[in-house]
Image (cartoon, rainbow, N blue to C red):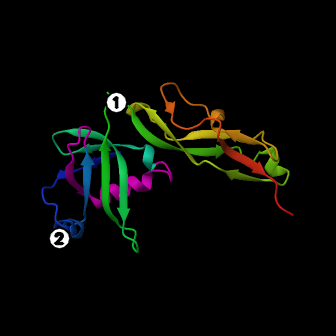
Amino acid sequence: MKLTISKRVSERKSDAKKLRRSAQVPGVLYGLEGDNQNISFPLDQLQAILREIRQGLLSTTVFELSDGDTTHRALIKEIQYHPASYAVLHADFCLVSHKKPVTVTVPIQVTGLADCVGIKGGGFMRQVIRAMKVSCPHNKIPQEFLLDVRELDISQSKTLADIVIPAGIKPLAKMNEVAVVIAKRAG
């Protein structure tokens, strides 16, 4: 995802408001060695990117931030929205390096619900863990982990260890924790 950025020097609140009125979003680009930069970027570019990204996959999307001279690879650290209009007010990015692994939270997507034995038998799925933290090189960040529940019956579960994790990705969670359970309906 490509985003055109501009460096900004002022840090006053009034300057941020001026940027927003001119359809720009203020932000911060956090460096690897603590060398942070104040930046701004076009609101319409960010909105177009956010529309393309499937729900829940923003934390694993690597952005290419270009200021004309150089291109940086970064992950979104935080987005601040207006409480009433949900307009983007501010966005923070964190640089990634090919030398250091990054820590990201990868969503867990459950598949096979329509064919699940336990659900067909009257149960329901309860997803206990929706995401897992991992450490990996920035070029190997998985968009999501898939967990197939097709063969689960009522009162059966799957743990994080049942997720197929590609080589080079180190999970930062206890792998014996229950991720999904097929529960019996009350009554």
Q: For the residue labelled by badge 2, is the local secondary structure a helix, a strand or a loop?
A: helix
- The x and y percentages for residue 47 are 36, 59
Residue 135's mark? none
Q: How many numbered marks, from 0 up?
A: 2
Task: Give the residue displayed 78% in from the left and 39% down from the top.
Answer: 151
Asked whether 52 falls inside the magenta stretch, the response is yes
Q: Residue at x 50, y 30 (%)?
A: 170
What residue is at 49 percent from the left and 30 percent from the top?
169
In screen coordinates, is 62 left or right of 177? left
> Circle 2: is it few (<14), some (14-19), or many (20+) Cα within 10 Å?
few
CA separation in Å, label 2 and label 1: 37 Å
In the rendering, at what x and y percent does residue 146 appear? 61, 39
Asked which quadrant contains residue 175, the reply is top right
Q: Is residue 110 visible?
A: yes
To which residue does mark 1 refer?
100
Residue hosting label 2: 14
Which stretch did the figure color magenta? Answer: 31-57
Q: Is residue 110 above or below residue 167?
A: below
Is 15 left or right of 128, judged from the image as shown? Answer: left
Indicate the secondary structure of the residue bearing disc 1: loop
Q: Residue 94 at what x, y percent from top left? A: 31, 44
Q: Amino acid at mark 1?
A: Lys
Which residue, as the protein is rendered here, is positioned at the far left? 9
